[in-house]
């Protein structure tokens, strides 16, 4: 079968022929991959800035934002049947001992020795067929087929919102999201459906489709200085934005950092202390947040969600991975059709 493979020795990404996977255990599910979303993580993988191949070799199939259709299930699988749509949860527990992996929260792994399909030490899903244990697959309602590829990034948004609302003392009224990529826009839409006043701050021109989409959904768009807010989400990946996020916090505010890298700048510890402000880092999300993401995708305006996705065929994938994201597409998705 076709598999888009990252070769860690030759340091390149190429379409390759791989043996199709087979069911080896009773609790496993074989599914046909329908489409795969690409994100900044995939672009860093093809630059070999992160990731590692499975222990058994020097290459790894890429792709961690997948949607599939079940083809076959093992005899011990309950609740999934051929024809069902599924989205995989990508992180797998560490060998332990690890109290958080033991309680099903590998997203909070304490040892760092977890694997992630398509990122760290395990093959991903940019291939025609894949197998997973049923517990790693989230069943998606058929009505969400056209947007379900967003569930993996959306699960991280759900975990962020959960962390922010739990950490905030009282009822937050307003939020600023820094960055208008997929995570930033999905965060803004999820905050809007929860009734907050939301502004997105980014560098895009005012007349781009994504700014129009945000405004239609009642989100304010800013290119200049953002106001202070109860909740701030850094979703741009730039360390300057993370410093800005912390500085914009209203008293008792909570900043969620989603993408920033380490960098130099002034961190306002004094303001943090005197204003009871909090800063939280978030990565990866477990199954319950995929289920919360399904509920939110249902609440979003279908046109807004469709407007986020641009689909391409798989033959364009290598080019997509080596190019910056196109300005018109918030989420670039490749189908497995050639
Ligand atoms: Zn991703
Ligand atoms: Zn662990």
Image: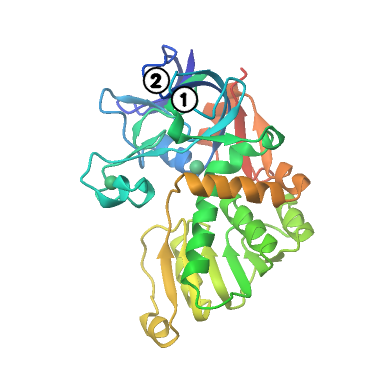
Q: Are marks 1 and 2 in contact (CB under 8 Å)?
A: yes
As drawn, the residue found furthest toward the bottom would be 274
Question: What residue is disc 2 on?
Answer: 26
Residue of label 1: 77
Looking at marks 1 and 2 on the same chain, the residue that comes earlier in the sequence is marked by: 2
- Residue 211: give x, y in percent of width and height: 72, 56
- Rendering quarter of residue 19: top left
x 48%, y 32%: residue: 63
Q: Nearer the viewer, residue 165 or 74?
A: 74
Residue 161, horizontal then vertical, whole percent: 54, 61
Residue nearest the viewer, comparing 335 with 221: 335
Q: Which type of secondary structure does the marked residue at label 1 adopt? A: loop
> Which corner quadrant holds the C terminus?
top right
How far is disc 1 from disc 2 in space, using C-alphas? Answer: 7 Å
121 versus 10 height, above or below: below
Tell me: is circle 1 under 8 Å from ligand 2.
no
**Which residue occupies 73% across, 60% down?**
206
Label 1: few (<14), some or many (≥20) within 10 Å? some
Q: Answer above or below: position of 62 versus 270.
A: above
> Which percent across, then down, holds residue 314?
58, 23
| Residue 2 visible in the picture | yes
């Amino acid at each position: 079968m076709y598999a888009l493979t990252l070769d860690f020795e030759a340091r390149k990404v190429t379409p390759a022929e791989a043996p199709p996977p087979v069911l080896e255990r009773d609790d496993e599910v074989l599914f046909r991959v329908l489409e795969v979303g690409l994100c900044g993580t995939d672009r860093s993988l093809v630059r070999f800035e992160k990731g590692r191949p499975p222990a058994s070799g020097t290459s790894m199939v890429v792709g961690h934002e997948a949607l599939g259709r079940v083809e076959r299930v093992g005899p011990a699988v309950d609740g999934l049947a051929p024809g069902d749509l599924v989205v995989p949860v990508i992180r797998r527990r560490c060998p332990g001992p690890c109290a958080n992996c033991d309680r099903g929260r590998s997203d909070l792994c304490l040892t760092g020795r977890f694997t992630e399909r398509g990122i760290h030490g395990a093959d991903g899903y940019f291939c025609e067929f894949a197998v997973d244990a049923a517990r790693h697959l989230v069943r998606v309602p058929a009505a969400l087929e056209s947007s379900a590829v967003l569930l993996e990034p959306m699960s991280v948004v759900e975990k962020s919102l959960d962390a922010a609302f739990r950490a905030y003392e009282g009822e937050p009224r307003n939020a600023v999201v820094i960055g208008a990529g997929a995570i930033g826009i999905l965060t803004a839409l999820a905050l809007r459906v929860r009734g907050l006043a939301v502004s997105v701050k980014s560098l895009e021109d005012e007349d781009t489709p994504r700014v129009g989409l945000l405004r239609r959904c009642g989100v304010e768009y800013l290119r200049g200085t953002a106001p202070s807010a109860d909740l701030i989400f850094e979703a741009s990946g730039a360390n300057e934005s993370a410093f800005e996020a912390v500085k914009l916090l209203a008293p008792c505010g909570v900043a969620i950092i989603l993408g920033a890298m380490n960098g130099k700048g002034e961190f306002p510890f004094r303001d943090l202390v005197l204003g009871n402000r909090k800063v939280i880092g978030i990565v990866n999300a477990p199954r319950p947040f995929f289920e919360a993401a399904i509920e939110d995708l249902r609440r979003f305006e279908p046109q807004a969600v469709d407007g986020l996705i641009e689909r391409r065929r798989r033959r364009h994938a290598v080019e997509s991975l080596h190019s910056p994201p196109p300005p018109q597409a918030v989420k670039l998705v490749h189908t497995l059709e050639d």
